[in-house]
Amino acid sequence: MSDRINLLIVEDDKALAQGLARALKTQDREIKCVAKIREARQILKEEQPDLMILDVNLPDGNGFDFLGEVKAQGAFPVILLTANDLETDIVAGLEAGADDYITKPFSLAVLRARVNTQLRRRMDAGTRAKAVWSFGRYRFCFDRMEYYLDGKPVELSRNEQKLLRLLVENEGMILKRETLMDRIWTDGAEYVDENALSVTVKRLRDKLEAGKWIETIYGTGYRWVRK
């Protein structure tokens, strides 16, 4: 996680959403509130929050269905918020991928504690993940600059390493071309040909046989998706 913690509240009760935002607000947190699933989808196209609070009953859809969609694309924790306290609903929410489940009415102190617990777990997981990423055919040791495909080492250039780390550490998130250009070519060069990014992406795909993992979002940028 970055120094700034981003929370997304998806709740159609405006007064409740504002109350949640006030209760969870701290100096290092940025909180966004939306009332509909389509608004949440739009935000998730641009960035992934560090945590989402999701109401189950929304004007344009079912929170359970949206939860499955979110968990298929992102790795951030989601706390479900609902008036349904039936055991079957709680089980359904947890089985759909919810990290926690809070029923209305609830204590704001309890909500804050549960949010803080999820954020600590995410931070701990992020700290561990920085050392080694291992999944499928890949093993990436960013701190030691070691990269393996099917157990065999792969030599990557400095810019390929930067690109890979940006994509993997923001898995599922679309990174715009201009963002990648700024983050990779940070040597003060006044001009970098945009084709340089396309060439670097192609070389990285070829070396790691990652054509399906590095997804092109035409007209926007790239993202790393697990296959």
Image (cartoon, rainbow, N blue to C red):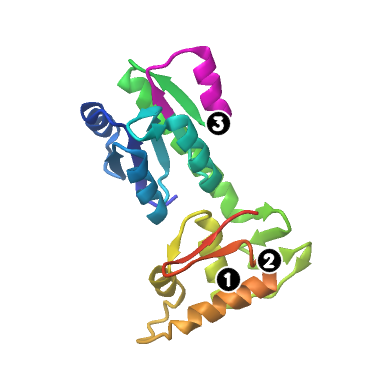
Return the disc, 2 or 1, that comes first in the chain's sequence. Answer: 2
Q: Earlier in the sequence, mark 3 or mark 2?
A: 3
The region drawn magenta spans 80-96
Q: In which quarter of the image is residue 116?
A: top left
Residue 161's label in the rendered image is 1
- Label 2 Cα crowd, 10 Å radius (few <14 / some 14-19 / many 20+): many
- Residue at coordinates 54% horizontally, 26% vertically from top-left? 94
Q: How crowded is mark 1: few (under 14 residues within 10 Å), some or many (20 or more)?
A: many
Q: Mark 3 sits on what residue? A: 96
Please identify the residue farthest to the top as the structure is shown.
86
Labelled disc at residue 147: 2
- Magenta run includes residue 88: yes
Q: Which of marks 1 and 3 is nearer the N terminus?
A: 3
Name the element at disc 3.
loop
Residue 113, given in percent of the width and then of the height, sits at 39, 26
Which three-letter amino acid code belongs to the residue tagged 1?
Gln
